[in-house]
Image: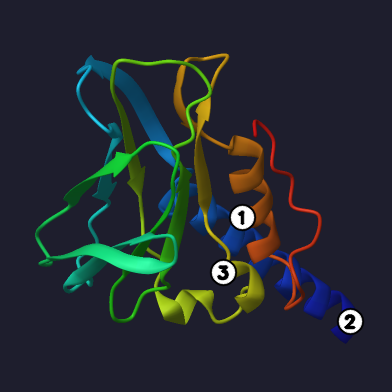
Amino acid sequence: MTHKINRMKTLAFKTCIWLFVCLNILPLQSQSSFVNDSDSLICLRIEGKILSTSKRGDCLIELFHAGALEDSMRLDSRAKHFGFELIRNSSYTIRISSNGFVTKLVCIDTKVSMPTKGIYRFKFTTGLMETAMAKRLNQDALEFPVALVYFDPTLKCFDYARDYTKSIKREWLKPNSSPNNLAVSGQ
């Protein structure tokens, strides 16, 4: 009987976590567009929006290029929007952190495989997970980027690897183990 109750509790916990992830940690929602500017080395304007939570304090947004900090900004608890202009054929990481919340990473590859004369625009919305809620999740998986942004030559715009994002979020729910075999499609 005790074993059956424990299984029910485990199932209920996993269901609650799954609902939390689906409802509060929204899949990366994105929008992409293009602005004509033939004289620019910049190929991408990436803009993010952090979903507000009443408990969030200041949020630090850092942009890393080739492993070095290139730019940063601090958003107060009311601010939600940030953005960076990125040069073509480079790799970047955006790190979003706030006290009491799990740090989130977004990786961007600005390699554009076709000739362009303008600046692409990629917008995304994301939420932050409280560290207290994350304690029962796979800590190794939480350290991986939540999204990989890249230029999709078929769509002719920047997009994110949806299969990778779905896969890493599934890994969050597994007991503490290394995230293996993460699917990276579209690259």
Query: In front here: 113 or 136?
Result: 113
Which numbered dot is residue 77? none
Relative side of 7 to 79, left or right: right
- The picture quadrant where one finds residue 132 is bottom left
Query: In front here: 114 or 7?
Result: 114
Residue 107, how many percent across, how many down? 47, 52
Q: Could you tell me the amino acid type at mark 2?
A: His
Is 181 above or below relative to 89? below
Residue on which the image places disc 3: 142
Is 127 above or below relative to 186? below
Mark 3 vs mark 2: in front: 3
Which numbered dot is residue 169? 1
Mark closest to the chain's N terminus, 2 or 1 = 2
Relative side of 150 to 166, left or right: left
Residue 148, how many percent across, how many down? 53, 45
Q: Residue at x 86, y 85 (%)?
A: 2
Q: Could you tell me the amino acid type at mark 1?
A: Lys
- The picture quadrant where one finds residue 162 is top right
Instruction: Characterize the local packing of mark 2: few (<14), some (14-19) or many (20 or more) Cα atoms within 10 angstroms.
Output: few
Mark closest to the chain's N terminus, 1 or 3 = 3
Q: In the picture, which quadrant includes the C terminus?
A: top right
Q: Residue at x 22, y 28 (%)?
A: 40
Q: Residue at x 62, y 73 (%)?
A: 137
Instruction: Characterize the local packing of mark 1: few (<14), some (14-19) or many (20 or more) Cα atoms within 10 angstroms.
Output: many
Residue 138: in sight, yes or no?
Answer: no
Residue on which the image places disc 2: 3
User: Mark 3 to mark 2: distance in Å?
Assistant: 30 Å
Relative side of 26 to 17, left or right: left
Residue 165: in sight, yes or no?
Answer: yes
